[in-house]
Amino acid sequence: MINLLLFLFFIACVSIAATLVVENPGIVKMHWFDYQVETSVAFIIFAILISAVLIVLLTLIIRLIFNAPSRFMERRNVRQLKSGITELTYSISALASSNIDAADTHIRKVEKLLGNTPLTILLSAQIAKTKGDEAKTQKLLEQLLEYKETEYLAARSLSDSANKQDNLPKALVMAKKAHSIDPKNAASALAVISLQTRLGHWDEAISNIHSLKIPRREKNRIRAFISLERGKSLIENSRDEEALSLTKNILSTLPKFPPALDFCAEVYERNQQATKAKKLRVKLGQLQQGKWLCKSCGHTQDSWKLHCESCMEMDSLGQPENSINNVSN
């Protein structure tokens, strides 16, 4: 509405000016060296308007000439982007249908069209992993560490890979990196704690339990399991008095957990506390001990450990009749 009013006002002004010029044509005289030029005011105004129009047209032409290369590159980039998205779609579809060679062919075309982006590197890493090329997968995951949007995923993947290769120090470094990126993620915190216990970093593992965003009861349960595993290590190294200091917390949190009762009974026996040991042995005899089943991989084993002997998952072992989560009740 405002633009329309401004346009009407401009037309009115031009009309008034044109009327004044027609009613008062006037004469303009100019002297230039030995020449004298006489013309009307209307012609001067007309000449000025024509000059202004020519200047505007010339400016537009110059701008088009200078902008032509950038416009060409812009259109070219748009075409490349569209082609890259199409090839990316083909690659994802081929990977989903387990046509790995086709997925690899299309992702190479994507790299030529779009260059190395987090998405193309991520898809290339997945293709390499599916093909079993661990070296290439590792290299691509390390590249993904450089991008904020894929840094967490790359760190977790590198940690898992190092864990499977029993390179626990590297696995812990990557797990800590992932946890620092997303400190509120309970899964990343548990991954750090799991690796710390496997490396025997007991104090650090216990300390990190406080940062877990889980219910207090769960924290106490995990702390008790770690203390139990630590106690078994102390007994193996004949550090009986240190193992004894862990029994109170273990029994208060896991009063019906057979491995906890068995451990504490042994500790009492080693520290000449036969009465306490006998009570625990009686209680232990009243509890059923079937094999231990891993809820992550389905592996069964005769004795309880903090980590599954097959998949090395922490806190995954339970009795078929009673899960670990219910044993402490």
Image (cartoon, helix red, strand yellow):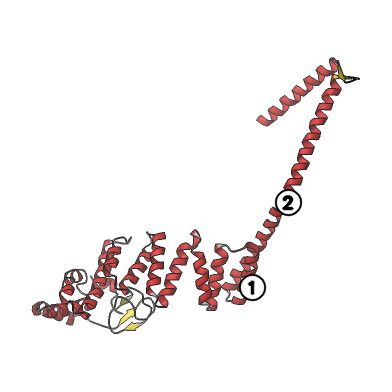
Label located before the other in sequence (1 or 2): 2
Q: Residue furthest bottom?
A: 302
- Bin the neighbour count of mark 1 within 10 Å (Cα to Cα): few under 14, some 14-19, many 20 and up: some
What is the x, y in percent for residue 299?
Answer: 36, 82
61 shown above or below 296? above
Point 64% across, 73% down: residue: 105
Q: How many marks?
A: 2
Q: Which residue is mark 1?
A: 105
| Residue 99 visible in rendering | no
What is the x, y in percent for residue 301?
Answer: 31, 84
Separation of residues labelled 1 and 2 (CA atoms)? 32 Å
The local secondary structure at tag 2 comes to helix
Q: Amino acid at mark 1?
A: Thr
- 19 horizontally vs 215: left or right: right
What is the quadrant of residue 31 in the picture?
Answer: top right
- 169 horizontally vs 18: left or right: left
Q: Which residue is more in the foreground, 7 or 58? A: 58
Point 69% across, 58% down: residue: 79
- Bin the neighbour count of mark 2 within 10 Å (Cα to Cα): few under 14, some 14-19, many 20 and up: few
9 shown above or below 302? above
The C terminus - image quarter: bottom left
Q: Which residue is mark 2?
A: 69
304 shown above or below 179? below
The N terminus - image quarter: top right
Q: Amino acid at mark 2?
A: Pro
- 33 horizontally vs 15: left or right: right
Q: Which residue is more in the foreground, 88 or 159? A: 159
What is the quadrant of residue 314 in the picture?
Answer: bottom left
- 169 horizontally vs 234: left or right: right
